[in-house]
Image (cartoon, rainbow, N blue to C red):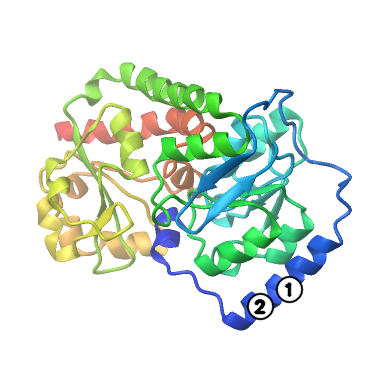
């Protein structure tokens, strides 16, 4: 499912499951050989002198990393991509089947790992049902989850396996550039954070420069969780930031909506669909074809001017929906060439 569905769900673990997995983690950890056969990573031959030891505080605890990690495991979204861009291909990553291609991996991750000539990371279950045993068997030196929804109970178990870097304040609320900074620090590459951030900003700015016609075009980025619902992503949400960076302007009305805490979005209800009447374009996505048909059949939804005239940017490619929802060093270049034609097509409807 798309990232916002994941963020909206409350993650839970039972006490008995926590105790069982914690015990298993300690047993397997004690049996570790300390000399794994393969790191599965192409860590850059860089000196990390002075970068370690390092302590990274989060809302769930402090990760104390004594030396540059060689075996990296990631949870949530974006961490794997940033680690790869820094030259540290993870040995394990949380699986994300909804946006994966035939390889079983998110395509931009699959492409980057192949290009680097690295071993594909092992994938394991995350979310509410983290596979702690699989993570333990990977013998990680660090677990990166700064943009995730891990709970305190999950964090405590993970921290028994390896130093775990969680989110600074709230789950699923870390800014994209802050995430890069945190990961770079954890991997002993603090100076590279600015380099990656600047590169992303330039890629988006260069794309915007090719589309001067996007200037003064307003948009709203909406979502639904089924018939009768309507939500709007706020300007600071990553997918809105990406579209804004391509040169379009968020509809001013969006700033008047009250945020649903910790989501960078506002549930306004379908009864308030009329408030989006001045949006030139509507950006959205649907979980499946059946839901799309149901949503579009609603009178209030169909009456939104942009929807009525077909000024909608919505892809049915789950990989694209996922990539356009997160800003990181691998998704942005992968998304740009796919996004511009979709936006261009929607803009042609404004003359109708």
**Residue holding disc 1:** 23
Q: Work out whether 20 lies above or below 111.
A: below
Which residue bears the numbered disc 2?
19
Residue 24 percent coordinates (x, y): 76, 71
Q: Quadrant of residue 217?
A: top left
Q: Position of residue 18 (x, y in %)?
A: 62, 75
Q: Is residue 205 visible?
A: yes
Left or right: where 297 falls relative to 279 = right
Q: Is residue 98 above or below residue 130?
A: above
Residue lying at 38% horizontally and 30% vertically, measured from the top left: 341
Residue 144 visible somewhere in the drawing: no
Q: Is residue 195 above or below residue 223?
A: above
Occupied quadrant, residue 175: top left
| 241 on left or right of 17 | left
Residue 126 horizontal/vertical position (percent)? 59, 61
Residue sitting at x 49%, y 36%: 180
Q: Residue at x 74, y 39 (%)?
A: 70
Q: Position of residue 55 (x, y in %)?
A: 56, 44
């Amino acid at each position: 499912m798309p990232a916002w569905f994941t963020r909206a769900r409350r993650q839970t673990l039972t006490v008995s499951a926590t105790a069982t997995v914690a015990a298993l983690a300690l047993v397997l950890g004690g049996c570790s050989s300390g000399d794994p056969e393969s790191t599965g990573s192409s860590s850059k031959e860089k000196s990390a002198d002075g970068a370690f030891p390092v302590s990274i505080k989060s809302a769930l605890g402090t990760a104390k990393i004594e030396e540059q990690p060689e075996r990296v495991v990631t949870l949530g979204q974006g961490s794997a991509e940033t680690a790869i861009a820094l030259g540290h291909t993870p040995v394990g990553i949380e699986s994300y089947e909804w946006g994966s291609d035939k390889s079983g991996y998110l395509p931009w991750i699959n492409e980057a790992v192949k290009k680097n000539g690295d071993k594909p990371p092992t994938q394991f279950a995350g979310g509410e049902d983290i596979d702690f045993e699989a993570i333990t068997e990977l013998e990680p030196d660090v677990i990166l989850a700064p943009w995730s929804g891990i709970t305190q109970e999950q964090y405590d178990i993970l921290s028994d396996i390896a130093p775990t870097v969680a989110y600074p304040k709230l789950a699923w609320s870390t800014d994209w550039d802050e995430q890069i900074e945190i990961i770079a620090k954890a991997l002993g590459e603090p100076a590279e954070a600015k380099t990656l951030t600047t590169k992303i900003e330039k890629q988006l700015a260069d794309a915007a420069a090719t589309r001067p016609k996007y200037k003064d075009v307003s948009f709203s980025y909406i979502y639904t969780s089924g018939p009768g619902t309507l939500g709007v992503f706020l300007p600071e949400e990553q997918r809105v930031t990406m579209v804004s960076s391509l040169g379009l302007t968020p509809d001013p009305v969006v700033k008047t909506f009250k945020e649903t805490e910790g989501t960078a979005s506002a549930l306004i209800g379908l009864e308030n669909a009329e408030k989006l009447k001045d949006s030139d374009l509507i950006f959205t996505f649907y979980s499946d074809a059946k839901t799309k048909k149901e949503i579009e059949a609603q009178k209030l939804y169909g009456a939104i001017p942009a929807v009525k005239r077909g000024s909608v940017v919505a892809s049915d490619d789950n990989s694209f929906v996922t990539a356009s929802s997160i800003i990181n060093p691998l998704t942005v270049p992968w998304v740009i060439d796919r996004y511009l034609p979709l936006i261009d097509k929607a803009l042609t409807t404004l003359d109708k």
